[in-house]
Amino acid sequence: MHAAFFLLLGASLARYLIRHEGEGHAGRVVVLFAVFGLLYVAGRFVAPPPPSGTRPHARYLAWVGTVLTVWVVLLALAPSAAWCAMPLFFTGLHTLSTRTAVSLAAVLTLLVVASKLRFAQGEFDPNAVIAPPAVAAVGTAVLVHLKRQAARQRALIDDLVRTRRDLAATERRAGILAERQRLSTEIHDTLAQGLSSQQMLLQAAERVWHADPGAARGHMRDAAEIASRSLTEARRFVHDLAPADLAERTLAPALAALADRESGAGPTVVFHLDGAPGPLPERVEAALLRIAQGALANVREHAGATRAALTLTCLDDQISLDIADDGRGFAVTAADAPAATTGRPGRGHGLPAMRARARQLGGTLTVESEPGEGTVVSAAIPLTPALDTSGKGGTS
């Protein structure tokens, strides 16, 4: 539009000089053309247009008014200046409100028509009356359409910015909740279990402290060993590492070692391996080991069992882990709320945590139990799953 303005301004000045050379006021008109062009250029620096969608400031309005006034005077002296109306309209008036811009367009069009009729020579030319309103109507329609499109675009951009801001806040909250869930699950499966075992061993040592000092010292050594393992686990999950039992061994030996340790502090635990496990992803091994730890912690604390069995079954398309005990059992319908079955408020994090671990890997966790018949907890993980990193996929 700037280039079109100066091109039409030069053409209007040339046309005026060709047709009106030698007239008495020609010099003043040339000066007025120069002032008109300089005012247009000065406005780009002294009164820059306001940002799109904002109200024009006083300096910009003063510049628009000055340029239009000079143009009206110039139009009265040189009708060829009418060609500058269209680029001037787009560059100077597009920032005004639609009603103001349309009204000014109508006034400018009338001035152009009046100038054409005033300087018409010979017979009446219909184009002098029809062409300017037609061009002005097209230009005004285009301008109004562009302004409406710009307003809709600004609204869409504002909505997008708000949506992105809300999404970022939601993702941040989700990340915080996921990290809290991770820490709570890790603490339950490591530190809480270790502390529970230590408590049982220390209580047993206190009961036999005088009657059997050797057994009491054995319980104390076991408690110290559990404390050492718990400290190692705490350091590892703080750094988001795999369980300590998997640092130098695979899943099957880690489950066997877990069974041996649990046999010393509670019911007898045996480990069975069915099939030959191939290389497994670290996440699968860590999840199954944590599920085994959580299930054995529930057996030790709530089941009153004398025996428990860990069974790892390796198939072509999935790997499953069963934890069975001969304890008191409970109603399966209450499996989602074990605190209600144990009568111990504030507990019941184990089964939801185990289900979450299996679900994150696209697997399932089921619980089979009857009062007085023991309990079987089964976790099945597909070996080629579409892993659900959000923790919301899968079913249990």
Image: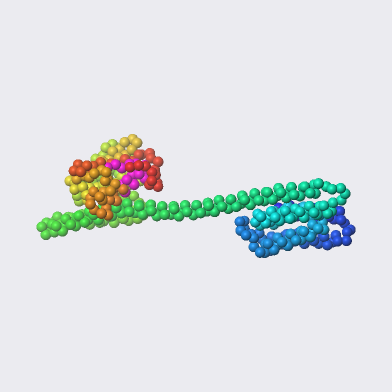
Q: Nearer the viewer, residue 319 or 214?
A: 319
Q: Is residue 366 magenta?
A: yes
Residue at horizontal 25%, vertical 54%? 345
Question: Is residue 213 shown left or right of residue 225?
Answer: left
Q: Is residue 151 above or below residue 373?
A: below
- Say which of 141 and 6 sits in front: 141
Q: Is residue 327 left or right of residue 90?
A: left
Using the image as rendered, state which of residue 238 and residue 244 is in the foreground: 238
The image quadrant of residue 369 is: top left
Q: How many discs appear?
A: 0
The residue furthest left is 211
Taking the spot 74% from the left edge, 55% from the top edge, the residue there is: 108
Q: Provide the residue span drawn in magenta.
A: 353-367
Name the colouring of the figure.
Answer: rainbow
Give the image location of residue 304, x and y in percent: 19, 48
Q: Quadrant of residue 387?
A: top left
Query: Residue at position x 22%, y 47% from top?
Result: 299
Residue positioned 66% across, 60% down in the render: 48
| Residue 261 seen in the current view | no
Residue farthest to the top?
316
- Among the 4 quarters of the image, the one containing residue 370: top left
Residue 316 can be seen, yes or no: yes
Q: Is residue 76 above or below residue 361?
A: below
386 left or right of 74? left
Give yes or no for residue 230 being in the magenta stretch. no
| Residue 360 horizontal/vertical position (percent) | 36, 45
Residue 233 lies, in percent from the top left, at 30, 54
283 sits left or right of 297 in the view? right
Quarter containing the C terminus: top left
> In the image, residue 158 lies at what x, y percent?
54, 54
